[in-house]
Image (cartoon, helix red, strand yellow):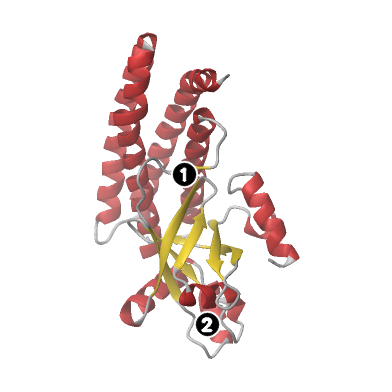
């Protein structure tokens, strides 16, 4: 059973689809469910994370610099298959404890993003573990805790809004350099947007076009906006990928993408969510 503080965070996280206040407000947070090393019962813990590139996220077993590894880490060492809740998606993952140069590189990347990790390491004699959580592919659509397709669409959109807000805040505090983790964060949201829009074009939009020919002008506009956003995504990828990328050049691309995407999401929600909700009504 989580301690009272963790349980409060877990309850708030689930009730508000990943949005919490207090200490974790505005932070990247996930719920990690592990299997007890001895009890073999499930244990859920709120854990901060970083995008890891591809279909993995990175978590760090700091325990605030305590002398012992946190329970969730000992659990996943014994039972590496875990459950991840992002606030939008819930999926199974394979936990891989990183070592050697890869562990050191990713820990240094985290320290570059937040000096607090270095402070935690300085407080303990143990080497703080770094763990990659690799999403396990599954058949069918991703699992979203939503009561309808309309709600699911809004939750996915809110996830993109939240991530872009975090990235813009990271730029505000990054100073004169574009850190390695911030690069990964930008590239990860680019990948996520590409996958989401490709899925809509091939799935949702085709299904709606077959059932609701009257929506053709709306769907045509949304497809054009997808193409325009894809251009902005590629431009962001290009400037982020430059070896000596200048944050003052990258930030405007982030802002352009965020503004274009916000207008697109608002229009899509306005025109499609009522249709999806009506289709789900008994």
**Residue plotted at (33% across, 49% down):** 249
Find residue 230 and report its image quarter: top left
Q: What's the distance in space between the residues labelled 1 and 2, CA to CA? A: 36 Å
Give the number of the disc on residue 58: none
Residue depth check, mark 1 versus mark 2: number of the one nearer the observer: 1
For residue 281, above or below residue 73: above
217 or 81: nearer the viewer = 81
In the picture of the structure, the residue carrying the numbered disc 2 is: 121
Find residue 135 and report its image quarter: bottom left
Q: How many numbered marks appear?
A: 2
Q: Position of residue 203 (x, y in %)?
A: 33, 30
Give the position of the C terminus as an image quadrant: top right
**Residue plotted at (35% across, 53% down):** 137
Mark positioned earlier in the residue sequence (1 or 2): 2
On the picture, is 276 further left or further right than 104?
A: right
For residue 50, above or below residue 105: above
Q: Are marks 1 and 2 in contact (CB under 8 Å)?
A: no
In the picture of the structure, the residue carrying the numbered disc 1 is: 143
**Residue plotted at (47% across, 85% down):** 127
- Please identify the residue farthest to the top as the structure is shown: 214
């Amino acid at each position: 059973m989580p301690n009272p503080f963790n349980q409060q965070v877990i309850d708030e996280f689930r009730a508000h689809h990943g949005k919490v206040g207090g200490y974790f407000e505005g932070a990247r947070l996930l719920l990690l469910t592990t299997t007890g090393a001895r009890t073999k019962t499930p244990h859920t813990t709120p854990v901060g994370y970083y995008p890891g590139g591809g279909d993995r996220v990175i978590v760090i077993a700091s325990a605030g610099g305590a002398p012992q590894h946190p329970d969730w880490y000992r659990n996943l060492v014994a039972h590496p298959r875990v459950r991840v809740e992002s606030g939008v998606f819930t999926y199974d993952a394979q936990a891989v404890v990183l070592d050697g140069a890869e562990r050191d590189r990713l820990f240094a990347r985290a320290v570059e993003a937040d000096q607090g990790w270095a402070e935690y390491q300085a407080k303990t004699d143990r080497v703080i573990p770094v763990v990659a959580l690799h999403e396990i592919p599954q058949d069918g659509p991703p699992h979203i805790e939503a009561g309808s397709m309309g709600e699911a669409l809004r939750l996915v959109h809110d996830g993109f809004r939240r991530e872009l807000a975090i990235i813009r805040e990271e730029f505000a505090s990054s100073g004169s350099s574009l850190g390695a983790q911030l690069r990964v964060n930008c590239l990860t949201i680019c990948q996520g947007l590409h996958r989401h829009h490709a899925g809509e074009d091939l799935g949702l939009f085709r299904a709606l076009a077959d059932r609701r020919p009257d929506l053709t002008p709306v769907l045509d506009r949304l497809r054009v906006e997808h193409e325009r956003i894809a251009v902005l995504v590629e431009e962001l990828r290009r400037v982020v990928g430059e070896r000596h990328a200048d944050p003052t050049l990258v930030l405007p691309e982030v802002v352009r993408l965020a503004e274009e995407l916000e207008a697109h999401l608002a229009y899509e929600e306005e025109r499609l969510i009522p249709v999806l909700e009506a289709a789900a009504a008994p």
